[in-house]
Amino acid sequence: MVTDNSTVSTLQETPDTVEDGSASAVGAELEFRRSGVTVPCQPGSTVLEAALGAGVALRSSCRQGLCGTCKLTLIEGQVDMRHQGGIRQREIDRGFFLPCCSRPVTDLVIDA
């Protein structure tokens, strides 16, 4: 389920974004809705790196945005996703994203 508050993009120019499109020095907060876990994501880290570093187990394989194994639904927030073909545009349009190659631009709520 996608709400109007979720955005997956390739480079967002917002006040919370630094030149490379990653979250600002403040970082972001990631809420994994089904797991009931909220973890911090340091600037420059991917959603997958933050989750695994905090002990949240997410499926993954290539960690490069190629295979699509880690695909999840973004409920709220914005990410900068730099994938290598592991997700289709119609999936992105439905609110899916690849945590392995996505850096938060804002705080996120994820269906996981």
Image (cartoon, rainbow, N blue to C red):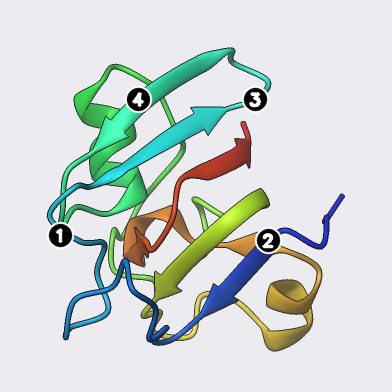
Q: Is residue 9 left or right of residue 23?
A: right
Mark-to-mark CA distance, 2 and 4: 18 Å
Q: Quadrant of residue 77?
A: bottom right
Task: Give the x, y percent position of residue 81.
Answer: 42, 74
Q: What amino acid does circle 3 point to?
A: Arg
Percent position (x, y) of residue 61?
35, 51
Q: Residue furthest top?
A: 36
| Residue at x-position 29% and y-position 58% | 63
In the displayed structure, 55 sits above or below 8; it is above
Percent across and percent down for residue 86 are 51, 75
Label disc, if present, on residue 39 of the rendered structure: 4
Q: Which residue is mark 3?
A: 33
Q: Secondary structure at mark 3?
A: loop
Q: Read off the residue under disc 2.
A: 6
The residue singled out by tag 1 in the image is 44
Q: Which tag, 3 or 2, sits closer to the chain's start?
A: 2
Question: Left or right: 74 with respect to 14?
Answer: right
Q: CA distance from mark 1 to mark 3?
A: 23 Å
Left of 72 or right of it: where is 107? left
User: Which residue is at 58% across, 12% downward?
Assistant: 36
For marks 2 and 4, the one nearer the N-term is 2
Distance, label 3 to label 2, CA atoms, is: 14 Å
How far apart are the alpha carbons under marks 4 and 3?
Answer: 11 Å
The image shows a total of numbered marks equal to: 4
Q: Amino acid at mark 4?
A: Val
Above or below for 63 versus 59: below
The residue under the point 38% across, 71% down is: 65
Mark 1 secondary-structure assignment: loop
Assign the C terminus to one quadrant of the image. top right
Looking at the image, tell me whether mark 1 or mark 3 is earlier in sequence order.
3
At label 1, the amino acid type is: Gly
Q: Who is closer to the viewer here, 13 or 55?
A: 13
